[in-house]
Amino acid sequence: MLYVLSGKVTGLSSATILSAISQGELFAARFAVFVTIKINTIKNKTFKKKMRITIASIILIISATAIGAEDTPSHFDIPEQVLNNITKESRNKLQDIIAKAQHGDKASQTVMGLIYLNGLSESPSVKDINKAFYWLNLAAKQNYDEAEFYLGQIYHYGYDNTGPNYRIAIYWYEKAAEKGNEQAQINCANIYQFGPQEFQNINKAKYWLQKAVQKDNPIAHANLGIIGIQENKYAEAIPHLKIAAEKGQRLGQYNYGTLFFNGQGVPKDIRQAKYWFEKAATQNLPIAQITLGQIYAWGLDGNGINKEEALLWLNKAKAQGQFTDKQINAIISKKID
């Protein structure tokens, strides 16, 4: 858990105000399922990883419910008892998907994989790991990038009691990324940039991020900005972070603000820093809320101490489980661990 800092807190001379973490960020799945068939939303996982630099590193990834080993299902349709438990309209849509999947439609096969992976909201018991894996692989064998992407996710995050397999995740991500799948490009770069040491390869991370940047992806801009900061190449980092921030990417906003706060590659400007911190904080980014709390608690913006505003932001971070009363009191009383 980050919350502070090095240097004095009595003024603006602190070169490092935040210890940095990396946090996962929502990058919504593109795959839309028919309106009457509700597939559980694929949830994001948040990753925290301490960094030496004074910005929050960005790991933007998507996680999925994982699936198991490949097995051929004993039958290819949804059980009759499940069909009886869903609405007529949903049943008709579902049966149409099944028919198309059985006839080789790769998009429908991917939907089938996701249905078995996540279940139906009207009938969660439809979940079947082996069938999910079966259908996703059928679609992937047709070189369908969406299916390849989801298989990459599965191995990226592991399944059941099986941990991640980064090597296989990279294999599937790169197959999808080579076809222009933007999410796969981001996730593959994420492993190369932030994954286990043996898989880190900054040049490969840059390669896939630059591919995504060609589509003006704000996540790619943000992560390329991080690399620029790490390499002390501020002239390269600043434009990427600026774009990410202006596009509303909250960690991009926060990291862009830290450059102004610390005077890294830009003139030191607390007003600008505070502006971007507030943008990120209003999007419920805990580190930005904590930073604002510090600024107000210590009067770092030159406007004097404002404990009421400090507590407002610090308590928002606390509400997300990212801060404690003890840490809040330490900031308010200027006791820094």
Image (spheres, rainbow, N blue to C red):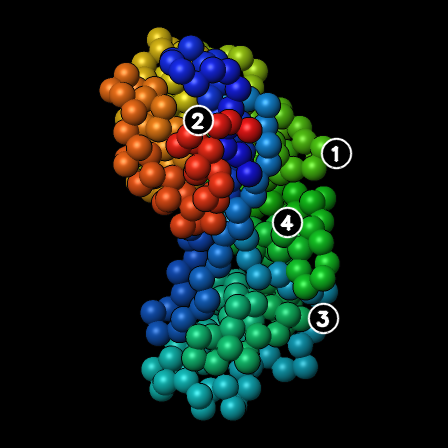
Q: How far apart are the two marked residues, 1 and 2, measured between alpha carbons?
A: 41 Å
Task: Find disc 3 in the rendering and name its residue.
Answer: 71
Q: How far apart are the two marked residues, 1 and 4, measured between alpha carbons?
A: 15 Å
Residue 308 is situated, as x and y percent measured from the top left of the image, at 28, 36
Residue 310 is situated, as x and y percent measured from the top left of the image, at 33, 34
Q: Secondary structure at mark 3?
A: loop
In front of the other: 278 or 43: 278
Q: Is residue 110 above or below residue 332?
A: below
Task: Find disc 4 in the rendering and name its residue.
Answer: 156
Front tag of 1 and 2: 2
Q: Badge 1, how many Cα within 10 Å: few under 14, some, many 20+? A: few
The earlier-in-sequence mark between 3 and 2 is: 3
Q: Amino acid at mark 4?
A: His
Marks 1 and 2 close (CB-CB < 8 Å) = no
Residue appearing at x 63%, y 82% in the figure? 75
Q: Secondary structure at mark 1?
A: helix
Q: How far apart are the two marked residues, 2 and 4, measured between alpha carbons?
A: 41 Å
Task: Find disc 2 in the rendering and name its residue.
Answer: 334
Mark seen at residue 198: 1
